[in-house]
Image (cartoon, grey):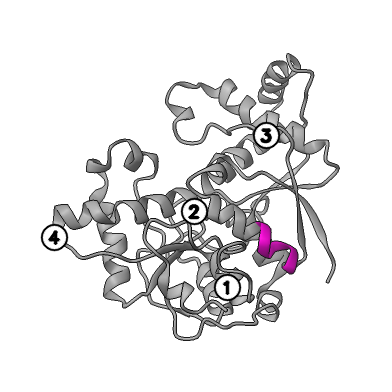
């Protein structure tokens, strides 16, 4: 297997709410021929709340600094697993590449710290790397412990494939309205992807964190369909989606009289268990608010 080295930007959630995504990706990606070279001294990209009062130049400078640091790694690809980080970083990269005014503004800010950036990296979502560079055959080849009988609702969320997935610079890797990549990931592990129309619905994003009373109805629909379809677990690629859909199930039960208790895991955790890796050290399945028992029961 040819090894691909990429600059890896984990994003802020990797240090707290989505540490289990980061842990499991670092475990499984080398088995798929991808080596992470973590961007040195990376900073928050300003996702979500940064748009409230940050302004265009400060926001662009945050991502620009990460890209400038990554440029020194000597790699061509800047890869992140977070939907919001990907949107911010990819958008900024394209603006710096194509718009001289933006490039000058960002480099004026970066110049204070002795940095500059020209837009020459390829900013990619890790799922796109898995689809386009790794391929499902390579994923299936690593499966030593098929997750046979596990029913999974693949919840992609609203940002991972919008708006760049069907663009040339975004890798042309899936569609906006009916993406299939997550079901492909699930099936590759030997699990069953249940029919799921809510797969690209919004969970409320950062609004759910700040004002959940405004978005609980959105999460109710997401979890409710997964339950109706008989899913044992919900799997997602998005850190904020995972947090919202998992942590608000108790609030949903209290408000709506439901009985939700469905684990919400990352696809990379399914990969780790299917690859026969350690369910704690590699899959980090112990770091859930709702115990991932259906997946843990299949670990070896």
Circle 3 residue: 42
Q: Are marks 1 and 3 in contact (CB under 8 Å)?
A: no
Which dot, 2 or 3, sits closer to the camera?
A: 3
Image side of residue 282 versus residue 250, left or right: right
Task: Provide the residue designation for mark 2.
Answer: 238
Magenta stretch contains residue 30: yes
Q: Are marks 2 and 3 in contact (CB under 8 Å)?
A: no
Q: CA distance from mark 2 to mark 1?
A: 19 Å
For residue 165, which quarter of the picture? bottom right
Q: Nearer the viewer, residue 178 or 283?
A: 283
Tag 3, which secondary structure? loop
Mark 2 surroundings: few (<14), some (14-19) or many (≥20) residues within 10 A = many
Q: Quadrant of the C terminus?
A: bottom right
Query: Regarding mark 2 in the picture, which secondary structure is present there?
Result: loop
* Residue 204 position within the rendered picture, expressed as x and y whole percent measured from the top left: 34, 46
Q: Residue at x 57, y 73 (%)?
A: 273
Mark nearer the viewer, 2 or 1: 1
Mark 1–mark 3 distance (CA, rounded to whole Å): 30 Å
| 17 vs 33: above or below | above
Identify the residue at image location x=47%, y=46%.
17
Precedes in sequence: disc 1 or disc 4: 4
Q: Which region is colored magenta?
A: 26-31
The image's mark for residue 273 is: 1
- Circle 4 sits on which residue? 257
Q: CA distance from mark 1 to mark 4?
A: 33 Å
Left or right: residue 248 compared with residue 64? left
- Cα distance between the residues tagged 2 and 3: 20 Å
Q: Nearer the viewer, mark 1 or mark 4?
A: 1
Closer to the chain start, of discs 2 and 3, is 3
Circle 1 SS class:
helix
User: What separation in Å lies between label 4 and label 3 (alpha carbons)?
Assistant: 43 Å
């Amino acid at each position: 297997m040819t090894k691909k080295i990429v600059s890896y930007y984990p994003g802020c959630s990797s240090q707290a709410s989505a540490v289990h995504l980061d842990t499991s990706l670092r475990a499984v990606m080398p088995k798929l021929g991808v080596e992470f070279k973590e961007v040195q001294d990376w900073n928050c990209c300003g996702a979500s709340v940064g748009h409230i009062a940050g302004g265009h130049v400060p926001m662009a400078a945050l991502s620009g600094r990460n890209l400038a640091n990554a440029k020194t790694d000597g790699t061509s690809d800047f890869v992140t697993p977070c939907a919001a980080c990907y949107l911010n970083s990819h958008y900024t990269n394209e603006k710096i590449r194509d718009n001289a005014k933006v490039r000058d503004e960002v480099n004026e800010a970066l110049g204070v710290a002795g940095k500059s950036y020209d837009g020459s990296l390829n900013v990619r979502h890790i799922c796109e790397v898995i689809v386009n560079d790794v391929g499902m055959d390579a994923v299936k080849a690593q499966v030593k412990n098929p997750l046979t009988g596990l029913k999974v609702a693949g919840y992609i969320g609203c940002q991972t494939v919008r708006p760049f997935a069907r663009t040339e610079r975004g890798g042309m890797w899936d569609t906006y309205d009916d993406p299939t990549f997550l079901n492909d990931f699930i099936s590759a592990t030997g699990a069953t992807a249940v029919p799921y129309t809510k797969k690209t619905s919004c969970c409320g994003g950062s609004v759910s964190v700040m004002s959940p009373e405004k978005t609980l109805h959105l999460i109710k629909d997401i979890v409710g369909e997964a339950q109706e379809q008989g899913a044992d677990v919900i799997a997602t690629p998005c850190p904020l989606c995972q947090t919202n859909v998992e942590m608000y199930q108790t609030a949903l039960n209290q408000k709506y009289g439901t009985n939700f208790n469905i684990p919400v895991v990352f696809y990379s955790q399914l990969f780790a268990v299917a690859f026969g890796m350690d369910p704690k050290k590699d899959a980090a399945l112990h770091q859930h608010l709702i115990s991932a028992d259906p997946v843990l029961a299949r670990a070896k």
